[in-house]
Image: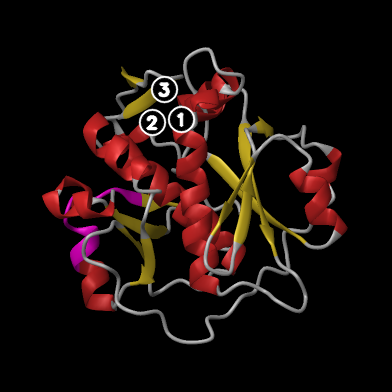
Amino acid sequence: MWLVAQFPAPLELVLVSHDQTHPSDSPFQSEQSPRDEAPQFVLPLVARIEKGAPPARTDALETAARAVLVILGDERSAGEGEWAQVMRDWQDARIRKVVRRARGAEWRRAEALAGITVSGKSAEVRVFPPVPLDGWPKDLARLQVSGTELEDPEPPLDPDPAVPVLWLNPGLDMSAGKAMAQTGHGAQLAWWELSDEARVAWRDAGYPLAVRTAEPDRWRELTSGGLPLVRDAGFTEIAPGSATVVADHRPLGRTGFRHLR
């Protein structure tokens, strides 16, 4: 797979090969792999969930996925950027993401830490550079993982055929926080699959994407079509090896995507 390095204007993109052709090197699998020998990091995401105005579930999932893409494509995450080394260390080990919730003063303290806030229609998610598995900043460590149960006030519309879709497994029951982490994984796998031209187009358009739950027949089709597939390591909520998300990044290879730029 490929990771992108960005430098300040004039923009230069340098692709560095991180080939993962062997399944034993998967960053998500439950079995032991060489990745377990490296220092372990986690990418923290904090969702703003106010008691009186929680975000819609689908919007929260889509916003979390875009937040992962935003930090992957940020100039501070590549080259000699201030987050570059820890981003490389994180991606060389297990690819872990943890979503926590914040409201009121908790959210304000989280916003004071180095990171990036990404906004959706109703959701706000702040993504932070990776931290050691046992070395969370105290203002993030005290935040709760539970309490991210969200609902969609209305069923989401069919996705725009011009944008990538992250398809959720219809056979799994995941909390919103767990699903946000999984869609973040899916977005990252899609990013790794893309050419430099497609990444630039996606970034310039603001990383549009959709998250939807597949119908069972559609899920079987998607998982047999060679698209990027997230298999969870089973640390929380679901069984190890469960297929959670398929990333259909194919719209990024179509000329129709250009109208979003």
Residue range of the region highlighted in magenta in the rendering: 221-229
Number of callouts: 3
**Circle 1 sits on which residue?**
33
Say above or below: 87 vs 109: above
Q: Does residue 98 appear to the left or right of 196 in the view shown?
A: right
Residue toward you, 151 or 55 = 55
**Circle 2 sits on which residue?**
25
Whether the magenta-drawn stretch holds residue 96 is answered as no
Residue toward you, 257 or 92 = 257
Q: Does residue 129 appear to the left or right of 213 in the view shown?
A: right
Q: Tell me if I can see residue 239 in this picture.
A: no
Residue toward you, 8 or 149 = 8
> What numbered label is drawn on residue 6?
3
Q: Residue at x 38, y 58 (%)?
A: 245
- The kind of secondary structure element at disc 1 is loop
Spatial CA span between label 2 and label 3 = 25 Å
Q: Quadrant of the N terminus?
A: top left
Graded by Cα atoms within 10 Å as few (under 14), some (14 to 19) or many (20 or more), the crowding at tag 3 reads: many
Q: Residue at x 66, y 38 (%)?
A: 115
- Mark 1 residue type: Ser
Q: Depth-wise, is mark 1 or mark 2 nearer the camera? A: 2
Say above or below: 54 vs 112: below
Is mark 1 in CB contact (under 8 Å) with mark 2? Answer: yes
Q: Position of residue 107 (x, y in %)?
A: 78, 55
Graded by Cα atoms within 10 Å as few (under 14), some (14 to 19) or many (20 or more), the crowding at tag 1 reads: some
- Mark 3 residue type: Gln
